[in-house]
Amino acid sequence: MTSPWSNNAKPMNTRRTKLALVSSLLLTVGCTAVENEPFVPDPDSRLPGGDTTNTLLTGSNSFLPPANNITVENEMRFFTGNSYFNQGWVTAPATTTTRDGLGPLFNARACSSCHFKDGRGAPPTGDDPTNFAGLLLRVSVERDGLHAPHPVYGDQIQPSGIQNVLGEATQSVTYEEIDGEYPDGTTYTLQRPTYVLSDFNYGEPEVPLLISPRVAPQMIGLGLLEAISGERLEALADPDDFDGDGVSGRVIYMEDGSTPGRFGWKSEQPTLASQNAGAFLGDLGITSELKPEQNCTDTQSACKEAIEGGEFEIEPHLFERVTVYTSMVAVPQRRSWGNQDVELGEQLFEEVQCATCHTPRHVTGSHAIAELENQTIFPYTDLLVHDMGPELADERPPAYSGAARPTEWRTPPLWGIGLFPDVNKHQRLLHDGRARGVEEAILWHGGEAELAREQFKSLTKEERDALIAFINSL
């Protein structure tokens, strides 16, 4: 039998858990007591980033250190990139010539505004429904069954502008409370968000804006994810569900038809460099070699005038250092190792088929940064997109044939998830941060994950708590 930890195997269901066996430890009709073999976690998973794992800093600083095996040369590049990631950009021209060029339209003044302490952003709360510091709204229009940038507002709402450039619109969110109940009678409440755009400064959209909210994810372990080979992703994919398990994750290929995507909530970016370039341009209005053109649309005259006579760029060698930085933020080591409830939760995680998409184990391949190669890692993702059902769908059709559809989202890695409350004082999960913790995130799963959700709901409260404790130990 193939081990569920095999690098090429789909995770398999385990035997029934310890708690479920309590009532049947003794066989009837005179049989003697029988117990399942004890569950033994993979010892390598204690260091989920392999040799790169952070074993030094904990608590609110858990996501700050570089890879533990970083070389002296890359450490210098890492901390240079760190400074350009964390410090604010200013309007050009300025005396700080390597840090000017903000805007003309932007969402934030620094990368760390959304990824505070390399952690996770959050959606607006009821206290301030217009504070979108950690969440952005992609927008588009439908054209021939595909999505395209809006002719006035482009592909992302940028609420702020420099000098005399007006931000594009005001963003706000409201939440609808949804009550639910487990089979055992335990109740729960979910929040369904509704996003509203108002106060348009460049005219009311003449056609409906299709909105896709995206919360800023944690920055840990990104280079390790980049080092997972395309062949590995293809081996995990099952777009036609040939094995009949109801899960049909697929690789998103770029428009060239051969380059796999792996970053972004829809796997729309193939590399960290392309992801970073897109974020610099879309979020800060900073151009780069990969994204040299500003995103002012033809009707945004003040925006276009603000860029005349100057180039608002991050210099290539500095962009390279930011990419080194984002590649080498270390993954923290597991917590609660050896805890009985956590081990039970890990066993349940596989049994209810969470591990079918949140694939525990990979071995990294080649990478431009040698420290990231040949590492046994446990990110708990397959980097594929899955149909998550209509409740989690956004409004946008795919950007091109084969791109992610409205119901499809990339499986997010789970490493570090239990540290969000320490690092960022919240645990808002899913692509738009609607879930207020692991339990709510599971309960929002639908589509291919509906069976896993229903199996989770059928567990006892003690079992559910154990499964959540395991996820929070990652």
Image: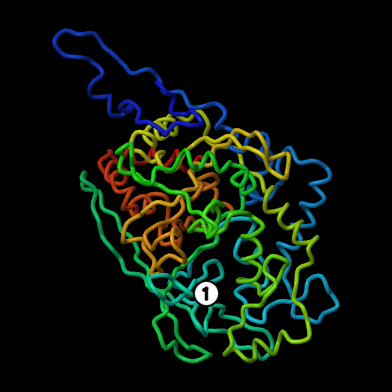
Mark 1 surroundings: few (<14), some (14-19) or many (≥20) residues within 10 A? many
Tag 1: amino acid? Asp
Residue for point 48% across, 58% down: 266
- Residue marked by disc 1: 155
- The answer to whether 322 appears left or right of 405 in the picture is right
Q: List x then y, in percent, for residue 414.
A: 50, 46
Q: Is residue 93 left or right of residue 456?
A: right
**Camera-side residue of 170 and 127:** 170
Say if 240 sits above or below 407 in the image.
above
Measured along the vertical axis of the image, is residue 137 above or below residue 430? Answer: below
Q: Which secondary structure, mark 1?
A: loop
Give the camera-side residue of 422 and 34: 34
129 shown above or below 250:
below
Q: Nearer the viewer, residue 385 or 50?
A: 385
Query: In which quarter of the view is residue 284 placed?
Result: bottom right
The answer to whether any part of residue 463 appears in the image is no
**Which residue in the rendered view is the most extreme toward the right?**
95
Identify the image quadrant of the N terminus.
top left
Q: Position of residue 440 (x, y in %)?
A: 37, 54
Q: Is residue 433 left or right of residue 312?
A: left
Res. 305 in view:
yes
Q: Could you tell me residue 450's position as x and y percent?
A: 29, 48
